[in-house]
């Protein structure tokens, strides 16, 4: 494969597409598919055939605003239809070349205008099961450029220059990590992709793997070239069967095109990728546990150092990055580190994909430049809190993160700002909560999650989260005392300070952040035996009456 | 330039200047200098897992606590092993252990010879503030010589490691996760029906009364884990 051949394939796709007058893209991502996108697509194909118009019906990955699904986008006019049913197929096909179907058209301009799409640039535009579609949108160009025009060091340098930080949550500088693995001695090195996305309310990585699998493969191949690895693993949770099947197809196609395997693109570079399935353990998203799981052992973390960069899979130097991190690589190599560096805030560069869920109008997948204010995400992109309710807090970072109260919506979204506010960026889950949420109950939910997902290896996480859960349950049920609260706070400190891995070290965050911003709700439960949001079922609770000021102080 | 056969590092532990070889753990160096760092899962002769978190120490200049059993020394390191912060955490960890299962010393075969018990005494633990979980756990007495009482188990995994690493049988392992984890024999078969070689090493290394010798019930039941470094030494000499 050469650049010319890639261009030829791209040209072939364009010629093929030019045969059609219209392109009808149907989102077939999980949210749309579960609302009947499959039936819709069949109906569209049938109607298009009957109409005699030259229409290309394409199934694509996630287009973003999942709550408006099933979504259909008609090109070349770029008309977006929302909540389309298979009964609407006839009207849509009929409208081609005429005026769009007004009652299906949705006004999501504000939703899209604030977004910058780098990772999701192809989402909704290509068929994820066709490698040629990916190639037609500059796919694999970056890999070829890296292999034929750049040295491995040059690639590492470009990534470093871009300022990209790990998108799995920790925010470790990617270039620095690559440089460490590149410098590690050893003939055999591995590249691993962490696709074990498990945070409640998060589906960014799933959408990328399902909607644009080649982007991940290309990023991994470039990484392998940069650090000198020959073998890669994609670790996907088995609960993502569509992602697994799309990745499997993509790997097969890439091998067929000579973009994986030995002597890639007529160079001496060899690289291939294997898929490994996770067996449903959240802790396997922690890198050392993930590596143990790939090796076929029980997925439990082990103390670092040694870091995987020095001693990872089977003791060999291993580069491990998140799906979204790899998805950023090809555009950076293509457009240069400076281009990426110029996006985002001072210390958090580029864009970030968030899964916007909870009490918000436009739930779904968004990609925004870092540094964007929280209110822009909630009010403009998200369309605000529906039903006349008031925004109370935003939970970011999943069970390792925290809640940011409504009066801090002017906060710019970056690794450091979120950390300073008592939460974390995490992998990109963003759960919006309104006045119907009880913050004590929210904290209890996340602690329960950490308790059931703790691997049980170290004592503070295993027994500590269980004790925290018991104490929070007491408070929620109205039997908690001030001593319980004091003990809870002390336990949070011990679990945070002494746990072995990130799961335990961050498990107290939901409790600590809600205590920081919503302490009055805890006190209401304990002192007045009432739940201000009316969520917790407290026996014998008195009618809602505001607590005296001195108790809340 | 060729690397020296071994490199000497100097560091400070609890205000004392000590020297160490490169690659030694903080715990090894501390013990060589009679500085006591509490441990439960660690056992000389077995691999270190850093699971009990009692050996965490403070390093000057870092807010992160390091497990002394696996953290290696570095030049100029200033280590504190017994600060107020560490004492508080150790208390809490021990309380968590006592509240986790059913540790009732007065009716335990290992009363007086239990590492958990003496650790609590050493650390000055006088009471447990946390709610006892009182789980309903089984006792497996199917083995002709030994018994496993899950109520006393602290999941230190010494039995798992000694069986896999020293005896080479790998009969013991962990099943379940989090608070529901238990040690099992083979694929959760009765111990008596398992592929156990009846060597008894697991019983000797068990820090509590979770694994015990049936013939010792009712009498003093000390354990003798000291065979382990000796056994390793003899194996290396061969």
Image: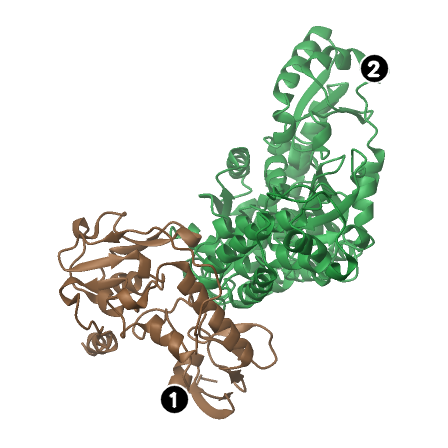
Chain colours: A green, B brown
Residue B51 placement: quadrant: bottom left
Image vertical order of residue A495 relative to residue B175, above or below: below
Residues marked 1 and 2, same chain = no
Question: Residue A345, percent across and down?
Answer: 79, 58
Whether A88 is drawn above or below A410: the answer is above
Circle 2 Cα neighbour tier, 10 Å, few/some/many (<14 / 14–19 / ≥20): few
Q: Mark 1 or 2, which is nearer the eye?
A: 1
A227 or A524, which lies in front? A524
Quadrant containing the C terminus of chain A in the rendered view:
bottom right
The outermost residue toward the bottom is B17
The percent position of residue A174, horizontal first and vertical second, equals 63, 59
Q: Which residue has dot 2 on it?
A: A97
- Residue occupying image coordinates x 50% and y 42%: A237
Q: Residue furthest top?
A: A50
Which label is found at residue A284? none
Up/down of A121 relative to B217, above or below? above
Question: Label 1 to label 2, Cα distance in Å?
Answer: 87 Å
Find the residue positioned furthest to the right.
A99
Left or right of residue B234, residue A219 in this image: right
Q: Position of residue A91 (x, y in %)?
A: 77, 12
Name the subunit of mark 1. Answer: B
Residue A261 drawn at (x, y percent): 49, 44
Residue drawn at point x = 44 percent, y = 70 percent: B127
Chain that bears disc 2? A
Residue at image position (44%, 84%) is B2
Can you say which quadrant of the picture contains the N terminus of chain A?
Answer: top right
Q: Nearer the viewer, residue B129 or A216?
A: B129
- Secondary element under disc 1, as helix, strand or loop, is loop
The residue carrying pointer 1 sits among few (fewer than 14), some (14 to 19) or many (20 or more) residues within 10 Å by Cα, namely few
Per the image, the residue denoted by label 1 is: B34
A114 on left or right of B47 = right
Do we see residue A231 in this rendering?
Answer: no
């Amino acid at each position: 494969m050469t650049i010319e051949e890639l261009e030829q394939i791209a040209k072939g796709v364009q010629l093929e597409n030019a045969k059609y007058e219209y392109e009808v893209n149907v989102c077939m991502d999980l949210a749309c598919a579960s609302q009947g996108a499959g039936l819709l697509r069949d109906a569209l194909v049938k109607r298009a055939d009957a109409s005699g118009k030259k229409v290309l019906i394409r199934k694509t990955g996630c287009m973003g605003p999942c709550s408006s699904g099933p979504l259909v986008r008609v090109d070349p006019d770029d008309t977006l239809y929302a909540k389309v049913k298979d009964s609407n197929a006839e009207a849509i096909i009929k409208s081609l070349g005429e005026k769009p179907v007004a009652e299906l058209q949705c006004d999501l301009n504000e939703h899209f205008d604030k977004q910058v799409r780098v990772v999701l640039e192809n989402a909704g535009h290509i068929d994820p099961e066709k490698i040629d579609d990916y190639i037609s949108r500059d796919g694999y160009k970056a890999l070829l450029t890296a292999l034929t025009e750049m040295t491995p060091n040059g690639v590492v340098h470009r990534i470093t220059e871009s300022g990209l930080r790990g998108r799995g949550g920790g925010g470790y500088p990617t270039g620095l990590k690559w440089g460490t693995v590149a410098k590690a001695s050893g003939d055999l090195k591995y590249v691993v992709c962490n696709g074990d996305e498990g945070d409640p309310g998060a589906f960014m990585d799933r959408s990328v793997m399902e909607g644009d699998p080649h982007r991940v493969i290309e990023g991994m191949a470039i990484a392998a070239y940069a650090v000198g690895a020959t073998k890669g693993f994609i670790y996907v949770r088995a609960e993502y069967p569509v992602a697994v099947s799309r990745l499997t197809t993509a790997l097969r196609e890439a091998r067929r095109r000579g973009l994986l395997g030995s002597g890639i693109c007529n160079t001496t570079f060899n690289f291939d990728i294997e898929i490994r399935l996770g067996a449903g353990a959240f802790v396997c998203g922690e890198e050392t546990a993930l590596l143990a799981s790939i090796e076929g052992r029980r997925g439990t973390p082990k103390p670092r150092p040694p870091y995987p960069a020095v001693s990872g899979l089977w003791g060999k130097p291993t580069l491990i990055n998140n799906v979204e991190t790899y998805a950023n690589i090809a555009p950076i190599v293509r457009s240069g580190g400076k281009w990426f560096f110029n996006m985002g805030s001072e210390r958090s560069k580029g864009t970030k994909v968030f899964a916007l869920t909870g009490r918000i109008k436009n739930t779904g997948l968004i990609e925004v430049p870092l540094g964007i204010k929280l209110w822009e995400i909630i009010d403009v992109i998200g369309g605000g809190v529906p039903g006349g309710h008031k925004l109370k807090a935003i939970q970011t970072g999943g069970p390792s993160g925290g809640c940011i109260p409504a009066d801090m919506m002017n906060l710019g979204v970056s690794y450091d700002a979120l950390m300073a506010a008592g939460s974390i960026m995490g992998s990109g889950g963003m759960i919006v909560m309104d006045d119907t949420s009880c913050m004590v109950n929210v904290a209890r939910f996340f602690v329960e999650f950490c308790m059931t997902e703790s691997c049980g290896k170290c004592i503070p996480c295993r027994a500590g989260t269980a004790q925290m859960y018991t104490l929070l349950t007491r408070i929620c049920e109205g039997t908690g005392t001030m001593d319980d609260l004091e003990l809870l706070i002390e336990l949070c400190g011990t679990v945070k300070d002494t746990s072995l891995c990130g799961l335990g070290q961050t498990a107290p965050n939901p409790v600590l952040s809600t205590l920081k911003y919503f302490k009055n709700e805890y006190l209401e439960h304990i002192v007045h035996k009432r739940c201000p949001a009316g969520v917790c079922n407290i026996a014998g609770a008195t009618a809602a009456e505001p607590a005296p000021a001195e108790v809340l102080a | 330039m060729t690397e020296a056969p071994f490199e000497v590092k100097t560091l400070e532990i609890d205000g004392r200047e000590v020297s160490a070889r490169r690659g030694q753990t903080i715990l090894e160096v501390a013990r060589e200098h009679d500085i006591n760092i509490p441990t439960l899962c660690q056992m000389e002769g077995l691999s270190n897992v850093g699971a009990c978190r009692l050996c965490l120490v403070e390093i000057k200049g870092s807010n992160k606590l390091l497990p002394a059993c696996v953290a290696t020394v570095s030049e100029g390191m200033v280590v504190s092993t017994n600060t107020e912060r560490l004492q508080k955490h150790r208390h809490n960890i021990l309380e968590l252990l006592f509240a986790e299962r059913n540790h009732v010393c007065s009716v335990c075969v290992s009363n007086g010879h239990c590492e958990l018990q003496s650790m609590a005494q050493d650390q000055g633990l006088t009471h447990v503030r946390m709610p006892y979980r009182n789980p309903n756990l089984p006792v497996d007495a199917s083995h002709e010589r030994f018994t496993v009482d899950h109520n006393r188990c602290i999941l230190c995994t010494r039995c798992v490691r000694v069986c896999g690493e020293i005896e080479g049988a790998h009969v013991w392992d962990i099943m379940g996760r989090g608070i529901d984890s238990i040690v099992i024999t083979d694929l959760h078969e009765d111990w008596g029906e398992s592929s156990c070689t009846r060597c008894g090493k697991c019983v000797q290394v068990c820090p509590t009364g979770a694994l015990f010798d049936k013939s010792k019930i009712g009498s003093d039941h000390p354990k003798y884990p000291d065979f382990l470094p000796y056994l390793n030494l003899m194996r290396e000499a061969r």
